[in-house]
Image (spheres, rainbow, N blue to C red):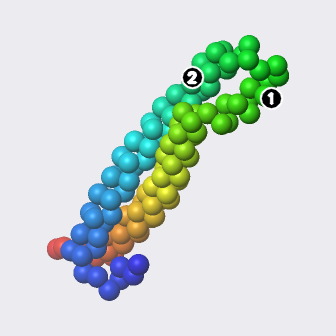
Amino acid sequence: MDFTSLNFKLVGSVHSRYAVRHSHAIFRAAFYRVRVAYATRDLRLLKARKRARLADKYKTKWQLDDALLKDKEIKELEDDLVDAEAKLTVIEALAGGYEDLRNAASREMFRRGVEKAPND
C-alpha cells in the first residue's frame, strides 16, 4: 500500500482501521486457541475413557486403537479439533497482515512528523 499519495488524515484513518482489525483478529485467535486446547483435552479424556472401558475386549493395543478410530464420538471431536486449528492458522496469518499494514501506516505517520519543518 502506498501511503505517500495520502494526506495525513487519511494515513491516520488507515492506521486506526488496521489497528482495530488487528486487535479483533488477535481476540479471535485467542478464542480459537482456547477451542483447540479444550478440544485436545476432551479428545484425550474421551480416548482414555474408551480405552479403559474397551481394554478387556481387544487383545492388542493396535486393535484397540483401530476400534477407537471408528468411534463416532471421537471422529466428531477430531473433526472439531481440525476445524479449530485450521481457523486459528488462517486468523493468525490475517492478524500478521493487519499488523504489517498498521505498522507501515505508523511508520509513515512518524516519517511525516519528523520531516515536518519546526514551528517558529
**Disc number lying in front (1 or 2):** 1
**Residue 103 visible to the viewer:** no
Name the amino acid, label 2: Leu
The outermost residue toward the bottom is: 5
> What count of labels does the image hold?
2
Neighbour class for label 1 at 10 Å: few (<14), some, many (≥20)? few
Q: Nearer the viewer, residue 50 or 3?
A: 50
Disc 1 versus disc 2: distance between alpha carbons?
19 Å
Q: Which residue is mark 2?
A: 45
In this view of the protein, can residue 36 be seen by the observer? yes
* Residue depicted at 28% across the width and 73% down the height: 11
Q: Amino acid at mark 1?
A: Trp
> 36 or 22: nearer the eye?
36
Residue plotted at (36% across, 57% down): 22
Where is the C terminus found, in terms of image quarters? bottom left
Q: Which mark is residue 86?
A: none
Q: Residue under circle 1?
A: 62
Helix, strand or loop at disc 1? helix
Please tell me how crowded label 2 is: few (under 14), some (14-19), or many (20+) other residues with Cα within 10 Å: few
Residue at figure coordinates x 36%, y 46% from the top left: 27
Q: Nearer the viewer, residue 66 or 42?
A: 66
Report the side of 41 relative to 107 (left or right): right
Q: Is residue 48 left or right of residue 14?
A: right
Q: Nearer the viewer, residue 56 or 88?
A: 56
Residue 106 lies left or right of residue 86; in this view the side is: left
Q: Indicate the quadrant where residue 7 lies.
A: bottom left
Residue 92 is situated, as x and y percent measured from the top left of the image, at 48, 54
Q: Is residue 85 above or below residue 38?
A: below
Q: Position of residue 50 (x, y in %)?
A: 62, 21
